[in-house]
Image: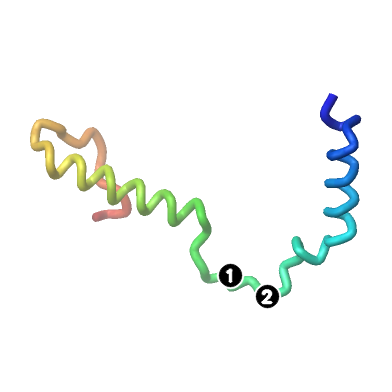
Amino acid sequence: MVTSKEGYIHLIEYLTEHLSLFENTQAVDQNSETVLTLIENELCEQIISVCSQNTALTPTRPSCHGK
C-alpha cells in the first residue's frame, strides 16, 4: 500500500514541517468571484459562441446570465 512506503512518510513529514506553505496570509476579498463562478461564466460564453456559429442549434432555455 502507498501509505506504508518510505516516500509517503517523507512526504507527510515535509508537509507537516512546512505547513506555512498552505496558510492563507492574505485577507480574502469577500466580493471577489469564486473559481466556480469564473468557470461558469467562461463555459457560458463558450456555449453562446458555439451556438451563434451554428444556426441549426436552438436554445432550449434562456441564455446564461441574461447575455
Q: What residue type is labelled 1?
A: Gln
Residue at the spot 90% in from the left edge and 30% down from the top edge? 4
Q: In this view, does 57 lie to the left or right of 47?
A: left
Mark 1: give few (<14), some (14-19) or many (20+) Cα within 10 Å. few
Question: Where residue 50 appears, x then y in whole percent?
Answer: 20, 41
Q: Which residue lies furthest to the front in this view?
A: 6
Quadrant housing the C terminus:
bottom left
Q: Which quadrant of the figure has residue 30?
A: bottom right
Q: In this view, does 4 lie to the left or right of 66?
A: right
Colour scheme of the rendered structure? rainbow
Q: Is residue 31 left or right of residue 8?
A: left
Does residue 40 sit above or below 56 in this rendering?
below
Does residue 29 sit above or below 38 in this rendering?
below
| In front of the other: 31 or 22 | 22
Question: Where residue 34 appears, x then y in whole percent?
Answer: 52, 59
Quadrant housing the N terminus:
top right
Question: Where residue 13 appears, x then y in whole percent?
Answer: 90, 50
Residue at the spot 35% in from the left edge and 46% down from the top edge? 43
| In front of the other: 30 or 16 | 16
**Distance from label 2 to label 1 (Cα)?**
12 Å
Q: Residue 30 carries which label?
A: 1
Q: Which mark is residue 26?
A: 2
Q: Residue furthest left?
A: 55
Residues at marks 2 and 1 touching, judged by CB atoms closer than 8 Å: no
Mark 2: give few (<14), some (14-19) or many (20+) Cα within 10 Å. few
Question: Where residue 7 appears, x then y in whole percent?
Answer: 85, 39
Tell me the mark number nearer the camera, choosing from 2 and 1. 2
Under tag 1, what secondary structure?
A: loop
Under tag 2, what secondary structure?
A: loop
Does residue 60 sit above or below 45 in this rendering?
above
Q: What residue type is labelled 2?
A: Gln
